[in-house]
Image (cartoon, rainbow, N blue to C red):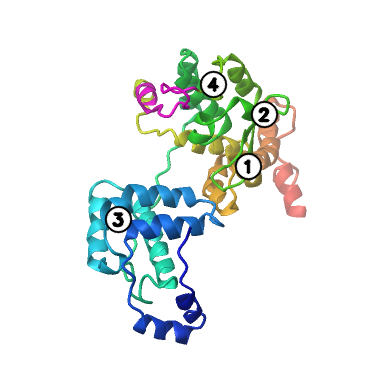
Amino acid sequence: MARRYPAIRSALSSPARAEDCGRRAKPAAVKLDAFIWDDYLPHIRLDKRSWRVDERIARQYLSAAFGARRLADIQRHEVENWLRGLSSGGLCAATCNRILAVFKAICSLAEIRGVLPVGQSPCTGVSSFKIHAQRERYLTRDEAWRLMRALEKSDRAEALALRLLLLTGARKSEVLKARWEHIRLDLRLLIVPLSKSGKPRHIPLSDEAIRIIRVIPRVPGCPWLFPGHAPGKPLSDIYLFWNGVRRGLGIADVRIHDLRHSFASFLVNAGHSLYEVQKLLGHSDPRTTMRYAHLGQEALVAAAETVSAFLVRPDKECAREKRGGSVDSSPSRDGSEDGRASSASL
C-alpha cells in the first residue's frame, strides 16, 4: 500500500503553498528502496505502460547504488559521480540517460509526497549525456540471402527463431516469449498480448514464416514456441549461437536487433509506405518509423529511371535507325539537317 501524505499533498495544491511547505517540512526518514517499492512503483503501475522498465532499472541500478540510503541524504555530486562511473564502465549514453530519468521521476514523486523538500532533489541540475548519431547497420540483399541459407542448414531452435526474426521484423522478445496459444495460423498472425507500447500487437506471418512454425516440435505440457533449457521457461539467450553464425558469414558487426532494421529497409526499398512499415514493426509513434525514410532512395531512383527511360529511349532508337539508313539523314535543301530545320521553324 502506497504511503499517503495528505497534509503535504494539500499544501502542494498551489505553487506558493508548495514553496512554503518545502521550507518548513522536514524530510521523512525514508530510504530510497522503501520509497521505490512502496510508493513509486505502485504509483506508476496505474498509468505508465513501461513501468516494468522502471522496475528493472530500480532493481539493477538504483537499489544497488543508493537503496539503503535516505533519499534526503543523497547528494547531487554523488549522483553525478555514479552516472560517470556507469558510463565509464561501458553503459551507453542512452541507457545512462534512461536511468537518470527514472531517478528524477522517483525524486519528483518524493517531493510531491513530502519525503523530500520541494526543490531538494539530488537529481536537480544533473545533466544528461549527449547522444551521438545512431548506429545504423542494415543487411544487404546478398548478406540476408546468405544468412537465410546458413540458418536453413540448422534445425536448432536458435536458427528457427532467427529465421522468424528476419521474416517478420519482430523484436527478439516477441519471438522468444511466444506461446503456442499466440499462434493463429488460420489468421496468419503471431499475437503479442502485451507489446512494448503496452498494447496487443498482431504480427503478420508470411508463407515461409508459417512453414517454419509448422516444423517446430511441440513439447508436451510446454506452452512456449521455443522452450528454454530451464524447465517451464522460454529460450532466453540466442547470442552465442548468433555470434558463431555472424562471424562465420563475415558479418560480425550485425546485431540481432539489426535483423528488425533490415526487415524495415527491405520493405522501404521495395516501395512500401512508411505507414505499412510502422504497422508491421508495431511502432506506436510514426516518428519512430521516420528513421527509415531515407532508405527509400533506391526505390526513388528506380522511379526516376522510368521517366529517364521514357525520355531517352526515343533518341537512342532514332540513332539506331539513322545508322541503319532507314531515316533520311541527308541535309535539306537549305543546307540544314531535317531535324534542325524543323526545330528552327518552331
Pointer 1 and pointer 2: residues touching (CB < 8 Å)? no
Q: Tell me the SS state at disc 3.
A: loop
What is the crowding at mark 1: few (fewer than 14 residues within 10 Å), some, or many (at least 20)?
few
Residue indicated by mark 4: 222
Q: Label 1 to label 2, Cα distance in Å?
A: 61 Å
Residue indicated by mark 3: 67
User: What is the quadrant of the C terminus in the image?
Assistant: bottom right
Pointer 3 and pointer 1: residues touching (CB < 8 Å)? no
What is the crowding at mark 3: few (fewer than 14 residues within 10 Å), some, or many (at least 20)?
some
Q: Which region shows up in magenta?
A: 227-245
Question: Which residue is rendered at x = 45% and y = 64% of the image?
Answer: 3
Q: Label 3 to label 1, Cα distance in Å?
A: 34 Å
Residue indicated by mark 1: 200
Q: Amino acid at mark 3?
A: Gly
Residue 114 position (above or below residue 289): below
Question: Which residue is rendered at x = 51% and y = 83% of the image?
Answer: 14
Q: Position of residue 166 (x, y in %)?
A: 52, 29
Pointer 1 and pointer 4: residues touching (CB < 8 Å)? no
Which of 45 and 24 lies nearest the eye of the viewer?
24
Residue indicated by mark 2: 320
Question: Which residue is rendered at x = 54% and y = 50% of the image?
Answer: 288
Q: Is residue 20 visible?
A: yes
Query: Which mark sits nearer the N-terminus, 1 or 4?
Result: 1
